[in-house]
């Protein structure tokens, strides 16, 4: 009888220990636009960074929920559905706790190398035909907006892939937008079938500073844990290697 009781006590302790060490599921909202978040592949630049961060926190089990950026902000502000939202820009409309800046956007001007353009500033774009993403005039500064307003060959497009097509096809001399999106577009099958142009056939003109977004958290303590991991991964170069992988 004593042995049975001891066995039962031991089994109970094991069960309690397992419960105590069970991972907590985190509902993490992510975007749904490639190459940053690719839902059907469960991959993407920003998603890989997010997975890498939470892999360092074994007490948590991430569950990713794909949605639009507008929805992400709404959900993290409501505090009902999400514990974490990725790719949130700092601003007064954010109610959660923001992480250190981690998700990097690199808006650049891209031209065909054979055109041999020298672009060192926004002023150098004035006489060129340009395809840019929708809203670029509101995000790239007053000098850029002034240039665009007086450039008859300037256009903006709702879908970034359209700007890539216009540059590759030669209909526009310059593509303005994020470099990661451009490189992702170049690898699409439509370009592989219609052109032999490669990444090395283009010149990247870096005339704007990088812009960063954050993770937003419902819980401050979790935010602090993640910030510690972000600091570590930035210092040891892991995050930088992920960015490099997506620009090859």
Image (tube, grey):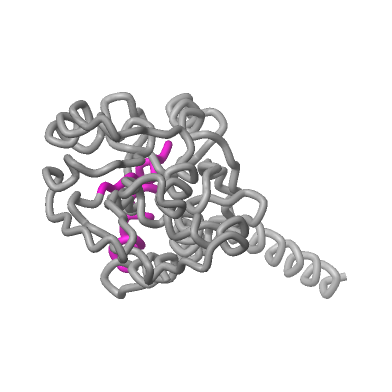
- Residue 137 picture quarter: top left
Residue that appears at 80% across and 65% down: 8
Residue that appears at 13% across and 55% down: 120
* Depicted 67 relative to depicted 238: above or below: above
- Residue 191 picture quarter: bottom right
Residue that appears at 26% across and 30% down: 152
Q: Position of residue 237 (x, y in %)?
A: 31, 73
Residue furthest toward the right? 1
Along the viewing direction, whichever of 151 and 179 lies nearer the viewer:
151
Q: Which residues are magenta?
A: 211-232
- Residue 1 picture quarter: bottom right
From the viewer's perspective, tell me whether residue 66 is left or right of residue 76: right
Q: Position of residue 167 (x, y in %)?
A: 40, 50
From the viewer's perspective, tell me whether residue 36 is left or right of residue 205: right
From the viewer's perspective, tell me whether residue 53 is left or right of residue 43: left
Residue that appears at 60% across and 56% down: 190
Q: Is residue 20 visible?
A: no
Along the viewing direction, whichever of 31 and 17 lies nearer the viewer:
31
Residue 237: in magenta span: no
Q: Quadrant of the C terminus?
A: bottom left
Q: Position of residue 174 (x, y in %)?
A: 31, 49
């Amino acid at each position: 009888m004593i042995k049975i009781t001891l066995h039962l006590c031991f089994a109970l302790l094991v069960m309690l220990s397992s419960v105590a060490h069970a991972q907590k599921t985190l509902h993490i909202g992510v975007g749904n636009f490639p190459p940053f978040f690719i839902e059907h592949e469960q991959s993407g630049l920003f998603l890989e960074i997010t997975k890498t961060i939470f892999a360092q926190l074994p007490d948590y089990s991430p569950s990713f929920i794909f949605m639009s950026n507008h929805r992400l902000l709404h959900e993290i502000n409501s505090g009902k559905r999400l514990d974490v939202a990725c790719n949130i820009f700092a601003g007064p409309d954010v109610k959660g706790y923001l992480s250190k800046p981690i998700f990097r956007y690199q808006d650049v001007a891209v031209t065909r190398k054979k055109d041999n353009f020298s672009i060192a500033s926004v002023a150098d774009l004035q006489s060129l035909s340009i395809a840019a993403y929708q809203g670029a005039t509101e995000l790239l500064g007053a000098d850029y907006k002034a240039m665009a307003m007086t450039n008859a060959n300037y256009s903006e497009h709702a879908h970034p892939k359209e700007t890539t097509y216009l540059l590759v096809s030669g209909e526009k001399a310059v593509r303005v937008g994020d470099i990661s999106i451009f490189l992702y577009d170049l690898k699409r099958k439509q370009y592989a079938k219609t052109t032999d142009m490669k990444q090395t056939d283009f010149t990247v003109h870096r005339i704007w500073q990088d812009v960063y977004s954050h993770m937003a958290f419902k819980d401050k303590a979790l935010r602090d844990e993640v910030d510690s991991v972000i600091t570590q991964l930035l210092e040891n170069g892991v995050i930088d290697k992920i960015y490099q992988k997506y620009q090859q």
